[in-house]
């Protein structure tokens, strides 16, 4: 069963097709789906600020996961009530399992609900703004909850969001029968998991063991080979996990590549700029969260503008490269930070510039990733945009953490370790990360310019004829 939008008209009869739903129904669905997406991106950062307090309380290590609606809400309640490491790990694992089903479903429903180009542009503009701003909202909310309530409420808060989303879904979303697509691609699934886990694990070990260590190169090699095997499997099986027709389309391929690379660069903002604000400027968790608000405003400004006005007219090709280059300029500005820099003159301008750029990246890429795709492939196409963003973020975290550690170690060599020298070493590591993030955004711009097709996006091939207004 697949949830689609209806308005539950009086009198039984044939269900209205997705594209024929009333205007109010479609926009109500957007509210539900935006709440679901907010939960996904919120979780990526909300626990970051709570982590030091939680570590002191439970003596734990944190592993990133994604989240879901009902299942995630229940897992959040379990995590909030955790009395030890094991219980919290179980809760976070359950969040990941339920979230893996929710994230692509939300984007898939959005793509099949909004098929008319102008409305689709507005909807994806809002959805893209949520995607770009949710991480910063998580930092702010995490800071407020950790400082004034408890770190546990960084998990409990998802119960509130899920309740609102579920209530809206029960009222405005309805099930539609869909055709079965065959057996699960078990060999492809195994190869994909081994490939991604090996790649991320090996990159993560580079921070502690070095780039030439066996536990770095071994898993990376296994991961690369497994991903090659995955592609070969997908070319041969009858029901592939990832039909290659989905990713080989230039617009969708451009979307996936752009968002993965930009996702790697984003961790230079959310993770290492947070370190600078707390360690160098001495910001509290709440003040750190508030510091990101101007960036959120600029993300939402350009995401909604690009989504509703520009994308339907010109397509993603001019917008995504421009946005990535603007974000690169903002990261470049942050490389000028010094120990005596202030937030107003040193951090704020860079954040605003980065936000303006990211807004131009998120909305067009998410729209392009699901445009012109058949309904049978909508779930896969939607899942890929979330998957590549998570992969990009994971690889980015591993790489940037390794580069930061190496930069700090190199700076300390031959120097007497004093508080000032340690602070300067930390600043050196942040500069290194900001430079690499700048490079990631420039690379995303080049890839987008090469891969995206010129002109407006393709229409939904399965959409019903547009109704006259």
Image: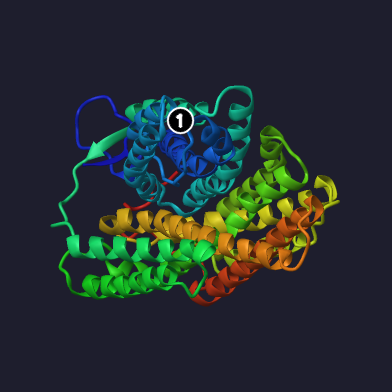
Is residue 136 found left or right of 180 in the rendered image?
right
Residue 313 in view in this figure: no
Q: Position of residue 373 (x, y in %)?
A: 34, 61
Label 1 packing within 10 angstroms: few (<14), some (14-19), many (20+): many
Q: Is residue 320 left or right of residue 120?
A: right
Residue 202, image quadrant: bottom left
Write down the residue under mark 1: 158
Image position of 87 with respect to 319: above or below: above
Q: Position of residue 437 (x, y in %)?
A: 63, 64
At a point 63% along the width and 70% down the height, the residue shown is: 439
Q: How many marks on residues?
A: 1
Is residue 260 visible to us here? yes
| Residue in the foreground of this view, choosing between 409 and 224 | 409
100 lies left or right of 358:
left
Image quarter in which the N terminus is found: top left
Question: At 43% across and 35% down in the image, what residue appears?
Answer: 32
Q: Residue furthest top?
A: 149
Residue at the (80%, 61%) spot, across then down: 336
Q: Is residue 278 left or right of residue 402?
A: right
* In-front residue for pair 98/61: 61
Up-down: is 237 above or below 293? below
Q: Quadrant of the C terminus?
A: top left
Residue 238, quarter of the rendered image: bottom left
Way the structure is coloured: rainbow
Answer with the quarter of the image where residue 195 lies: bottom left
Indicate the secondary structure of the residue bearing disc 1.
helix
Q: Where residue 142 sits: x, y (%)?
A: 58, 34
Residue 179 rendering spot, x and y as whole percentages:
16, 51
């Amino acid at each position: 069963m697949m949830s689609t939008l209806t308005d539950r008209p009086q009198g039984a009869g044939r269900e209205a097709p997705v594209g024929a739903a009333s205007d109010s129904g479609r926009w109500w669905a957007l509210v539900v789906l935006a709440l679901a997406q907010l939960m996904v991106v919120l979780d990526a950062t909300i626990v970051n600020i709570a982590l030091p307090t939680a570590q002191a309380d439970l003596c734990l290590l944190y592993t990133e996961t994604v989240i879901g609606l009902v299942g995630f809400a229940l897992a959040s309640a379990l995590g909030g009530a955790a009395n030890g490491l094991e219980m919290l790990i179980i809760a976070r694992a359950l969040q990941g399992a339920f979230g893996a089903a929710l994230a692509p479903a939300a984007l898939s429903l959005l793509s099949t609900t909004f098929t008319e180009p102008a409305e689709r542009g507005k909807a994806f503009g809002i959805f893209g703004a949520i995607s770009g701003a949710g991480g910063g909202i998580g930092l702010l909310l995490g800071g407020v909850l950790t400082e004034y309530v408890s770190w546990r409420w960084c998990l409990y808060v998802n119960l509130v969001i899920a309740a609102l989303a579920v209530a809206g879904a029960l009222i405005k979303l309805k099930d539609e029968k869909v055709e079965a697509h065959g057996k699960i691609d078990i060999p492809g699934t195994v190869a994909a998991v081994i490939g991604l886990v090996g790649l991320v694990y090996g990159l993560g070990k580079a921070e502690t063991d070095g780039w030439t260590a066996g536990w770095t190169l071994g898993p990376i090699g296994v991961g690369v080979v497994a991903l090659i095997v995955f592609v070969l499997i997908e070319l041969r099986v009858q029901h592939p996990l990832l039909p290659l027709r989905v990713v080989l389309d230039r617009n969708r391929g451009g979307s996936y590549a752009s968002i993965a690379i930009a996702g790697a660069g984003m961790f230079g903002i959310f993770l290492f700029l947070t370190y600078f604000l707390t360690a160098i400027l001495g910001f509290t968790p709440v003040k750190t969260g508030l510091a990101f608000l101007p960036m959120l405003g600029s993300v939402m400004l350009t995401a909604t503008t690009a989504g509703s006005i520009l994308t339907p007219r010109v397509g993603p090709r001019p917008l995504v490269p421009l946005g990535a280059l603007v974000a690169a300029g903002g990261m470049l500005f942050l490389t000028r930070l010094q120990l005596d820099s202030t937030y107003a003159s040193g951090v704020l301008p860079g954040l605003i510039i980065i936000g303006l750029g990211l807004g131009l990246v998120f909305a067009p890429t998410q729209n392009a990733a699901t445009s012109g795709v058949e309904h049978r492939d909508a779930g896969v196409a939607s899942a890929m945009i979330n998957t590549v963003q998570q992969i990009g973020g994971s690889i980015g975290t591993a790489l940037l953490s390794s580069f930061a550690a190496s930069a700090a170690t190199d700076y300390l060599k031959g120097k007497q370790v004093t508080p000032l020298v340690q602070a300067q070493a930390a600043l050196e590591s942040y500069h290194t990360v900001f430079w690499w993030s700048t490079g990631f955004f420039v690379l995303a711009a080049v890839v987008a310019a090469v891969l995206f097709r010129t002109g407006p996006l393709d229409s939904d091939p399965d959409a019903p004829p547009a109704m006259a207004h």
